[in-house]
Amino acid sequence: MIVMKFGGTSVGGVEAIRQVVEIVAKYREHDTVVVLSAMSKVTDALRDMAAQACEGTEPTASLSALRKRHDETIRALADGEERKQALEVCAGLIDELSGILHGITLLRELSPRSVDLVSSFGERLSVVVVSAALRSAGLSSLPVDAREYVKTNERYTEAEVNFAETDRRLSAGLAPMVSGGQIPIVTGFIGSTDEGVTTTLGRGASDYTASLVASALQAEEVWIWTDVDGAMTADPRIVEDARVLKEISYLEASEMSYFGAKVLHPMTMLPAVKQEIPIRIRNTFRTEHGGTLITSRTRSAPLGVKAVTSIDRLCLIMVEGTNLSRTPDTHARLFKTTADRKTQVVMITQASSEHDICLVVGEGDSPGTVKALKEEFRHEVAEGSLEEISVQSDLAVVAVVGGGMKGTPGIAARTFGILGEHGINIIAIAQGSSELNISFIIGRDDLRKTVQLVHASFGLGGDGDFEHD
């Protein structure tokens, strides 16, 4: 069995969906489950509608555009009874969405729970469209709402999956469909609580849904179809000679995703690793390209490093004080505060003297996190055992990633040596005990030059000496 996931650009319009139908038909000798994202830009449009409604204005024009886009796509891809049925189902969904947005307009209140409900309509619409297109092409398929199968907690917008219950439901629900000759077309990204309330797994999490399905059904492979040829040695918008990696390990892929590579959602690896299911990243629009294979183990690059990834728009929050080392509960209180705010901490560093702790967070999380920390440690600041909590903004993190880094001497020297030669200041450094990456903080203005220099210093470009196509 193959689980195929198609991203937003892969279902972004009529021609793209025709390509999806062609791909599914080409591999029909396999039992297949398809997982879909919303059509490109639809999730953003839905969230914009919700925000507009919260301000007291009905998003009438946006709803009309959404209806027109899906109607026109269905009319181009399906005919006869398939067209009629798909048009009716999509019309009903958009009417339901309109009612929800009207309620938000009246209340002028937009909770995370409401955001999740509104956001779910993109995937719920796309599975109807693509399933109709497949049936019109002679492929037996049916749309499947993942909310019946993917069970989560109530952490809206970033829900955590109940793996045991989700695995049981997916296995019991989807396996009979597949054995009966059907191709289930499953909504990515969404789930529900035990009470049936809609949740989402985080932006870009349709990959994660595909991995959950594959694990439950013990699939042979997961194929992530997207608009790039695979995982790359660096962001090609930054490094012109960045190239596709033929193979990487689960751990390398996880590190790359966490530190900014956009090819996979960071949670995707968890279910696949449990069953050791290979993941392939492939280009919907260049099916002849082999893409990237992600497995439990791959060969190392000659210099240990396989990729240079990056995240920008970050801030460094510094908690400093001479008495930190004598205050054993400081760390617990600090991390409880960030956890209560659901702040995503990108990186943590601490001086060996324990004089300061530094947290790297996104620009959007910074003001609220700083305010919460100042409130939590107000007594320590007042009595002088902690200095004022400070923030440094306009930063970026760069991560040098590779499974071969462990036991390879000179990685740090090569990385920081080239940056020192070009006068790039390193603000903070972190390295995990796994030695899969070295990550460091620099000024945002230095990001582009830094990635280019490090990428070149490890010979990762088109003239590199490993993994050529």
Image (cartoon, rainbow, N blue to C red):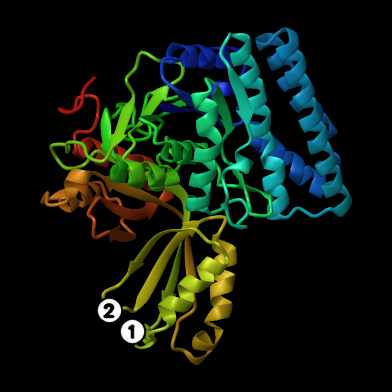
**Quarter location, residue 225:** top left
Q: Is residue 370 left or right of residue 224?
A: right
Q: How crowded is mark 1: few (under 14 residues within 10 Å), some or many (20 or more)?
A: some
Q: How far across and how far down the image is residue 258, in percent? A: 40, 48
Work out whether 409 lies above or below 68: below
Q: How far across and how far down the image is residue 124, in percent? A: 67, 33
For the residues bearing labels 1 and 2, Cβ distance under 8 angstroms = yes
Q: How far across and how far down the image is residue 412, in percent? A: 19, 53
Q: Is residue 228 left or right of residue 59?
A: left
Q: Which residue carries the number 1 mark? A: 325
Work out whether 59 lies above or below 382: above
Disc 1 versus disc 2: distance between alpha carbons?
8 Å
Residue visible at 63% across and 42% down in the picture? 147
Q: In this view, does 115 lie to the left or right of 225?
A: right
Residue visible at 53% across and 74% down in the picture? 373
Q: Residue furthest bottom?
A: 383
* The N terminus lies in quadrant: top left
Amino acid at pointer 1: Ser
Q: What element carries label 2?
A: loop
Amino acid at pointer 2: Ser
| Residue 445 visible to an observer of this rendering | no
Q: How far across and how far down the image is residue 64, in percent? A: 81, 26
* The C terminus lies in quadrant: top left
Closer to us: 307 or 138: 138
Residue visible at 32% across and 28% down in the picture? 292
Q: Which residue carries the number 2 mark? A: 353
| Residue 215 visible to an observer of this rendering | yes
Q: Residues within 10 Å of mark 2 (few under 14, many from 20)?
A: few
Closer to us: 313 or 56: 56
Which label lies toward us, 1 or 2?
1
Work out whether 106 lies above or below 99: below
